[in-house]
Amino acid sequence: MRRSLTRACAVVLAALALPVLAAGPVAAAKKPATTTTVKLQSTSLSGDGSTFQKGFNDVAIGYFKQLQKGVSISYQATGSGQGRTDFMNKVVDFAGTDAPYPASGPAPTDPFLYIPTVVAPITVSYNVSGVSGLKLSADTIAKIFQAQITTWNDPAIKADNPSAKLPSTKITVVHRSDGSGTTQNFTEFLVKAAPTTWTLGSASTVQWPASTQGASGNGGVAQLVSTTDGAVGYVDFSDAVAGNLTYAAIKNSSGKFITPSTKSAAVAVAGVTPNPDLTYDPINASGAAAYPITSPTWIMVYKTQGDAKKGAAIKAFLNFVLGTGTNQGQKLAATVDYAALPKTLLGKAKTAVNSIIVPA
């Protein structure tokens, strides 16, 4: 199961218990109607892709449903790679991804937008009996995930943790088995921070050593780590917290060991300049308090919509996701362990959403 009932599911259930808000503009108000006060026509939207963003999407969809009861939105966590493929083939109305289309690979022929939504850390979570509070440098992480380090009392781990009592337990490396933006961003960190050690490159899929184990989705990796003594894997922060996993502090580009949190992820993103298409890279960002394995995530949507009802609905939903009011997307992010976008990036994202063309 992706997350416990006490976390995101509880938040969604709370959303469904909220009083129904006015479906139309309030007569006494003189403010312009918004995408959450104008009643949309009944329609359905389908999306898939990133497992990293699913926890946030589930909660946002639950609250949006209270405002627009005629709009049905489904989101399947299939992995960023599958999401990009399905979006390109127009199998879905929108898709989630934690990494852009590769420059040398296939991409949609029709103009589309990357809409940033939230950010969060990628944790290095581990399950070693009696061990907590580990610190790990990029070189050590690279050697662990390349199976060059095979036991938890290896001298390299000891060097990062001189006062820790480390057992001789065998290390079980757990990685994503599906095409994954989390994999791409995790390995991109190793390419940047451990360039002379990491040899497996960076992509949505990597040729992992034969001794490692694969699992589908962030939730699958979290589950396998939690049930395997000696395991270590890379897991998005929301799933790591929901699964009560133990995760390491990671050495950043300033030489500081930083614990993953929404705050340290927000610091990493704050100083990043986005590209014109709103793709951006917070991996190994500068700053003494920045968490170095911070992941972006986007919802992809076509700039020109072919169906008026669907187009109006996706535009309204994205404006809701980027909203900063009570029970709107950016305020909901923290309830499921994601960080809201910084103001400058948020403003650019809203401008992009407003550029979506919906037929009359």
Image (cartoon, rainbow, N blue to C red):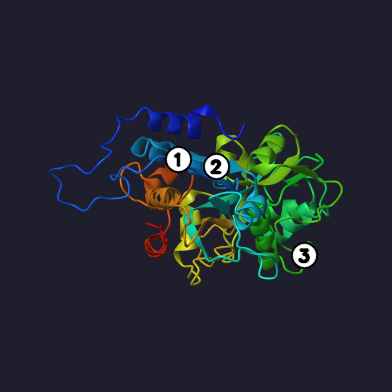
Mark 3, other Cα within 10 Å: few <14 / some 14–19 / many ≥20? some
Callouts 2 and 1 close, C-beta under 8 Å = yes
The tag on residue 197 is 3
Whether 214 is drawn above or below 14: the answer is: below
Give the CA distance from mark 3 to mark 2: 38 Å
Q: Which residue was labeled with disc 2?
A: 75
Q: Going 82% across and 41% down the picture, which residue do you hit?
A: 170
Amino acid at the residue labelled 2: Tyr
Give the mark nearest the N terminus, 2 or 1. 1
Give the mark nearest the N terminus, 3 or 2. 2
Give the quarter of the figure containing the C terminus.
bottom left
Amino acid at the residue labelled 1: Ile
Give the CA distance from mark 2 to mark 1: 9 Å
| Nearest to the observer: residue 242 or residue 255 | 242
- Mark closer to the observer (3, 2): 2
Q: Going 24% across and 50% down the picture, which residue do you hit?
A: 33
Give the mark nearest the N terminus, 1 or 3. 1
Amino acid at the residue labelled 3: Thr
Q: Secondary structure at mark 3?
A: loop
